[in-house]
Amino acid sequence: MTFKKHIAIAPAALALVLAGAAQQASAQSLFDVLFGGGRVERMSRGEFPPPPRADRMVRPNASSAPRHRNNAVAAKPIEKITGPVYYTYKADPLAQVDFTALESAGKTVSLEPSLENNAFREALSGLQDFDLFAEKDIAKALTDYYSANPDFIWVSGATANGRAQDAVRVLGEAESYGLDAAEYTVDVPSAGFSMDDMAARQRDLIRFEMTLSARVLRYVRDAQNGRVDPNRISGYHDFPAKPLDLVGTLKALAESGDTRAYLESRHPQNAEFRALRAELESLEASAENEIVVDPKLLLKPGGTSPELPKLLKLIQRDHSELIDDKYSEVLARLDNSEDYDKELVPLVEAVQKKLGLKPDGVVGPHTVSKLAGTSKADRIQKVILALEEMRWLPSDLGSPRVFINQPAFTASYIDGDQEKLKMRVIIGRPANQTSFFYDEIEQVDYNPYWGVPQSIIVNEMLPRLRSDPGYLDRSGYEVINSKGKRIPSSSINWGQYGGKVPFSIRQIPSEANALGELKILFPNKHAIYMHDTPQKGLFNRDSRAFSHGCVRLKDPRGMAAAVLDTNLDHVARKLKAGHSSERVSRKIPVYVAYFTAWPDASGKVEYFNDVYDRDTHLKLAIDKVEAARAPKAAETAQAL
């Protein structure tokens, strides 16, 4: 992979002192600007130093900052590079199915018509003045299929057949998959009817046929692709389309001997989806939390709170294995106390450590969330949203694979059914969010260069370069022109550029490099990748949204060894040899995912905070879909 391809990727911000001593740098994702857009918000002062005050600025000498002829000309105003935003979701509108295309099918006479075929043709007149609304692609699929196949799928003789009964039952069970059964409701014609009014019976049967086919197609599409198109939620969502042959689906159902099996097979077929579905069933059957703790509690050792006895009861109930003889005696004395005694601190720290939290003894929202959980309603919603998001991913997640769950701040390497490696990660801060997408890992770069993205060049570097054009030369950066030639930063009149700068800038490999000692690439338009970082201390935080988009790994060598199918000694030797790249020889999908409910390696579903408020946006999108599919929406569409 060439340097030019990746020169603009970079989740990390610079951080170097003016005199040349390197500070730790934090990573920034390459926003879409170089691949169709881009975003960067103002970084904190600790990541990229602001321009120095005039009275303290080191005055560059003539060699480091030559005088430009046009220095007297006013500099161009800087046009900040912006990036992904959240959209107002627009659901697919419903369209009235145009049955006039079926008239020719009714007039065509088959050489050897079956009784069902004749019945279908005779019943077609019952579609006159029938108002059936469906999504546009589904409406078209109905007329396309029945024009080419003028026969019933769901009717045999004068009644709904067994295939129809199975389909209606599956549609009625949609809630168990996190879907809304009301969106697939179909009224089945009653079994009893009068032979004296066969015309009315035929009308009811043909309308039932079309309605059930329309709702089955909606169900299949929702089961495979989700009710919501994620790419309409925000620029941070990026998923390829999942092709679905709707006409082919009706053909398959017409020929299938097991309607239930076919419809259920349209849902994701992986262990994670099954675990989430089982969790939903369990939650629906469960009682509300018996012990409810204030989710905003902040209790430090020595403090007092009426919530403390509740927390101690939860520890006794759910973490009894941590309570030895010593703590049994302490809890017997203090289990109803509202004073957070120092004797309780080691026990709280042990529980925090078990739960993967920073064991500092401070009981805050993260500790409360892990100990007490959220309300039953909140957990149900998180699971329903997770089931929806699962439909955006491939049904078969692949093996081996890397799975990053942003709200959990973790990355896992999974091979077969085993989680071989799991580590803490740092993701983008809310102002510079890590996108939600999947890709395929291609290579590992050792002692990497950091190609500074245009977003940082324009938004962060350019203001400083105008007052100190030579500071890049002094601070371990290279400036390269459009011909690939390295040129001094001090030789450029930076004031003439206000938008995209026609130079590439990269930070050379070093201990201060924003990417640390290695990066793992899966080329994508967001230029997000996994990498090391000099800022190791941030991994000790419970909430780890500090980067500018890329994913920083606590154990980058371990992840590199895993994806390369090698060992740590090999990685160490490559690092010792200097700057180089190594291709990944296997197909390894990587999921840069966002799930606030997700099963761990044992299948137990865990819950996480909505770091970017994406659950809220997804819930709003689902609400828009439900509103568009409601009967009143169909009436409005008809009126229009």
Image (cartoon, helix red, strand yellow):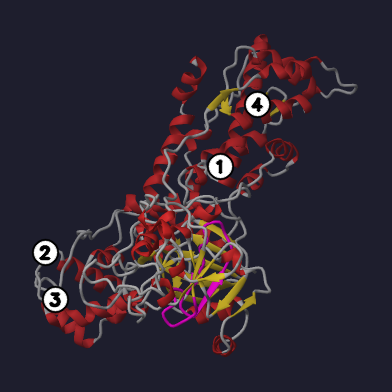
Q: Nearer the viewer, mark 2 or mark 1?
A: 1
User: What residue is drawn where x is 23% and y is 80%?
Assistant: 347
- Which residue type does callout 3 highlight? Pro
- Magenta stretch, main secondary structure class: loop
105 sits left or right of 421 in the view: right
Question: Eyeballing the image, is 370 above or below 345?
Answer: above
Q: Are marks 3 and 2 in contact (CB under 8 Å)?
A: no
Magenta region includes residue 515 = yes
Report the side of 108 relative to 626 (left or right). Answer: right
Query: Which segment did they paint magenta?
Result: 508-531
**Quadrant of the drawing holding the N terminus:** bottom right
Reading the image, the residue beneath label 2 is 306
Please report contact status of discs 4 and 1: CB closer than 8 Å, yes or no: no
Q: Earlier in the sequence, mark 4 or mark 2?
A: 4
- Please state which amino acid type lies under the numbered disc 1: Asp
Tell me which numbered mark, 3 or 2, is placed earlier along the sequence. 3
Please tell me whether mark 3 or mark 4 is closer to you in this view: 3
Q: Residues within 10 Å of mark 1 (few under 14, many from 20)?
A: some
